[in-house]
Image: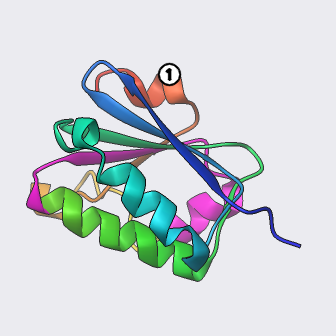
């Protein structure tokens, strides 16, 4: 049985931190979009998806992240990810969602960090 996702938002300076617990699936769309559409989040130039150590992302969950990225780009917001499991990190890399530091600025999608503190540093 999959662990239903819980998404809450808090703020650290100019960063909206989305704390994600459980599995990010197609059933998470309403919670993710609702969190993103909060007025205070709309004014943040930076968004951090902060996963808990037991979180997992299904293929449809990755689809939600891609949709979120499209919205972020329209508003010129930047996305970072913290705490993904090793398997989730590999999927981010495989499907091309991670930043290519050797490519031009336009190829930058997101950066992945081991911890929230690392992700917030220099953000």
The total number of labels drawn is 1
Task: Say few, some or many: other residues with alpha carbon within 10 Å of mark 1 (under 14 / 14 to 19 / 20 or more).
Answer: few
> Is residue 28 found inside the magenta-colored segment of the image?
no
Corner quadrant of residue 102: bottom left
**Looking at the picture, how far across and down is residue 22, in whole percent?**
72, 56
For residue 11, side relative to residue 73 (left or right): right
Q: The C terminus is located in which quarter?
A: top left
Which residue appears at 58% of the width and 58% of the height? 89
Question: In the image, residue 40 lies at what x, y percent?
Answer: 25, 35
7 left or right of 3 in image? left
In the depicted structure, whether residue 105 falls above or below residue 94: above
> Residue at label 1?
117
Which residue lies at the image location 73% right of the left edge and 44% below the top edge? 53
Magenta residue span: 74-92
- SS at badge 1: helix
Q: Is residue 77 magenta?
A: yes
| Residue depicted at 43% across the width and 72% down the height | 64
- The structure's colour scheme is rainbow
Q: Position of residue 55 (x, y in %)?
A: 70, 54
Front-most of residues 82 and 67: 67
Q: Residue at x 39, y 57 (%)?
A: 34
- Residue 19 drawn at (x, y percent): 55, 40
The quadrant of the rendering that contains the N terminus is bottom right
Whether residue 95 appears in this view of the structure is no
Question: Looking at the image, is 44 positioned above or below residue 70?
Answer: above
Q: Is residue 39 visible?
A: yes
Q: Is residue 28 left or right of residue 85?
A: left
Please tell me which residue lies in front, 80 or 25: 25
């Amino acid at each position: 049985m999959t662990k239903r996702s819980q998404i809450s938002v808090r703020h650290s300076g100019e960063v909206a931190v989305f704390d994600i617990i459980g599995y990010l699936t197609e059933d998470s769309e309403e919670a993710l979009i609702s969190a993103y559409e909060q007025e205070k989040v709309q004014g943040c130039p930076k968004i951090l998806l902060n996963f808990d150590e037991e979180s997992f992302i299904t293929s449809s969950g990755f689809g939600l992240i891609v949709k979120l990225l499209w919205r972020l780009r329209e508003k010129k917001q930047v996305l970072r990810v913290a705490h993904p499991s090793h398997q989730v990190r590999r999927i981010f890399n495989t499907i091309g969602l991670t930043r290519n530091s050797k490519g031009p600025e336009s190829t930058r999608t997101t950066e992945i960090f081991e911890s929230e503190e690392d992700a917030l540093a220099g953000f």
